Amino acid sequence: MAAHIGRRLRKGAATTAVAAAAVAALSASQAPGVTVDDQGRQSAGDATSAPDAAADDSATGNSPYYTDLPPLNSPAPSPSAGSGEAGDRSAAEAGIPATVLDAYKKAEAALRGTGCNLPWQLLAAIGKVESGQARGGRVDADGTTVSPILGPQLDGNGFALIRDTDNGAYDGNRMYDQAVGPMQFIPSTWSWAGRDGNGDGRKDPNNIYDAALAAGHYLCRYDWDLSQPGDLRKAILSYNNSTDYLNTVLSWLEYYRKGTHEIPDGTGALPDDRSDARPGVTPSAPGTTPPARPGTRPGKPSGSRPSPSPTAP
């Protein structure tokens, strides 16, 4: 137990140091939180790490996320094939699975000219923190995850309390909502934020093209200019209203801005540590098996999976 506590204390110190460096690099002062003014627009306020009221107003319902930080050494901007020694964490972490990377870049291109100045590296940073880049790029040729990526059910047991809003259509749970897919949207948010990013006529939160484009629109929805540190912070906090989350995403954003490279799908580095890895917090079982999703195409497995089991991102 003492060793475990010591490890977490050392990790906490490292988290603070790396996050502080990233925030400084992005010209960010002490990070504000998100509040809502009388026009319904979110603005700076006091952030909180605890998922509480209005969690369903965020993209993820303030669900748990991965807390791993990038390596201290910067990645090489354009490493040659096979460069870097085996086990070189910096080289491994700088690699983004090909289909996932393509989805991020296409989402950036789709929003170019809107004034949002969305960098694809921000989508990559959020994707890393939410799902480890779709579990290291485990997606099919269309960009759909080979198995569902579900957060724990939001039943108020150490998480926000968000009762079922989709009759289990996306998360397989008719009692409580769960964050779904590589960008971890909760069903109530996906119902209006979902996009068709790969042109197949469907809006599937389990598809990285759809989810990345939806995340881009979500981050740009208030005409924020993400090239400005203040708007960037507000946008990230609107995705998950936690200062720790903000600092972790900023750390990966700064890291990816220094250089990344494409790697084969399914070979990405997988994160280890999660924000809910604390005593007394255990992901719960899902609810009732959902009906087939409306609009599902016959014979397309990615849109008609029966009763996905609860899987941590």
Image (cartoon, helix red, strand yellow):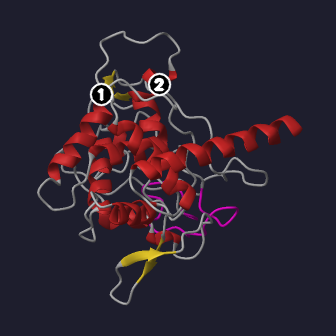
Compared with 36, 55 (above or below) is above
Instruction: Say which residue label 2 marks.
Output: 90
What amino acid does circle 1 point to? Answer: Ala
Quarter placement of the N terminus: top right
Q: Residue 255: which numbered mark, if any?
A: none
Foreground of the two, 15 or 51: 15
Residue at left 21%, top 60%?
A: 116
Q: Residue 98: which numbered mark, if any?
A: 1
Compared with 5, 225 (above or below) is below
What amino acid does circle 2 point to? Answer: Ser
Answer whether residue 293 is visible to the viewer in this image.
yes
Q: Earlier in the sequence, mark 1 or mark 2?
A: 2
First to last magenta residue range: 153-176
Answer whether residue 1 is visible to the viewer in this image.
no
Q: Which element carries disc 2, helix, strand or loop?
A: helix
Foreground of the two, 213 or 222: 222
Tell me if residue 169 is in the magenta stretch. Answer: yes
Can you give x and y, in whole percent of width and height, for residue 246 in the image? 49, 56
- Left or right: 229 in relation to 110: right
Q: Nearer the viewer, mark 1 or mark 2?
A: 2
